[in-house]
Amino acid sequence: MKQYLDKIKAAKTLDQLEELRVALLGKKGVLTEKMKALGKLDPEERKTAGLALNVEKQKITQALDEKKSELSLIEMNAKLAGEKLDLTLPVNQGAKKGTLTPMTHVMMEIAAIFSSMGFEMAEGPDIDDVYHNFDALNIPEHHPARERNASFFLEDSEFMLRTETSTVQIHKMEKTGAPVKIFVPGRVYRVDLDATHVPMFHQCEGLVVGEKITLQHLLGTLKTFIESYFEMDNVPVRMRQHFFPFTEPSFEIDTCYEKKDGKLVIGKGDNWMELLGAGMVHPNVLKNCGIDPEKYQGFAFGMGVERFIMAKYGITDMRKLFEGDVRWLRHYGFPANEVPTRAEGLS
């Protein structure tokens, strides 16, 4: 065995070391042939010889691994020494500049609008417990979203990937009580995949809690946001009654549109499109956060950011937002210097 170890030690390159490995441990290698020959020995001889052969194989394998690490480090250092960067070379003026994805641009745009309206941005964990994701939001145990095949649960755990950014509303109210005026952008996760749904997508929630908050405050806030986002005045908006466990009454907010030259034109036409869900915060949600619903009222709303991107910029397949196709990004991307700082028309 010493002669094999000496040859391994003397190897100068990774190629030489690989040749030795094949010669010793390959299909027709020396140790492989010895292993095959064990079957011809008597049981007692085979036991003794097999044990010794295993020890030999382990020592050779260890020596090969150690030598490979040593030679790899030598080769890497030699390569690094030869790859020096010449900082005096002129910049390539013809290089193509990258772009912001529509998701990044619109998330900043939404943040600019709500910040201009006096909202504070709040964030929370993507992984949360069932209480904050369901119970505190007044979502009953029989609700379909609580099924194991509808949401992403951590194995053998009461923790899960949040299905809504509403979890942050609960954390915020538990921590600070009332009054509250926040918007919550972030990722959410649901078991779903098609042209208009993906397992990970983005939402932006809003929550306002205070004394004497009414539906008129909710409608005024959403009209201001929608008109600022679509950069239009007097966008028609309707509130259609709906059901959400965490708001009462609950509504879906729609706007009209028409198709012109294959594109959606928001704010015109006789067709209606759902934009987001909203409503007055359910008294049970306030109670769960230690807030007296007799003294405080509030409204909440939540929107799928991808839906707003598709409506404004004519993107028809949500999955394209996450594929990273450079050609697609060149068409739909935004220059990095076009970062919104405030909502148009708001100061």
Image (cartoon, grey):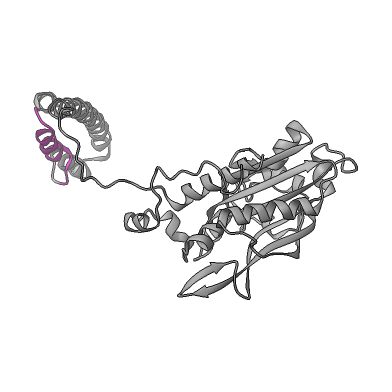
Specify the quadrant of the image occupied by residue 321: bottom left
> Is residue 18 in the magenta section?
yes
Quadrant (top left/top right/bottom left/bottom right) for the N terminus: top left
Residue numbers of the magenta segment:
12-27
Quadrant (top left/top right/bottom left/bottom right) for the C terminus: top right
Q: Position of residue 162 (x, y in %)?
A: 62, 47
Camera sees residue 186? no
Query: Foreground residue, 25 or 283?
Result: 283
Q: Residue furthest right?
A: 294
Camera sees residue 169? yes
Number of numbered markers: 0
Q: Residue at x 60, y 41 (%)?
A: 127
Q: Main secondary structure of the magenta part?
A: helix
Q: Residue at x 85, y 44 (%)?
A: 212
Q: Position of residue 235 (x, y in %)?
A: 63, 62
Locate residue 12 relative to residue 273 in the image: left or right: left
Q: Is residue 135 above or below residue 255?
A: above
Q: Position of residue 146 (x, y in %)?
A: 69, 54
Locate residue 76 relative to residue 119 in the image: left or right: left
Specify the quadrant of the image occupied by residue 245: bottom right
Query: Foreground residue, 185 or 200?
Result: 185
> Is residue 125 in the magenta section?
no
Q: Position of residue 171 (x, y in %)?
A: 70, 37
Q: Is residue 320 above or below residue 175?
A: below
Q: Is residue 140 above or below residue 21?
A: below
Q: Residue at x 78, y 36 (%)?
A: 179
Query: Foreground residue, 132 or 18?
Result: 132
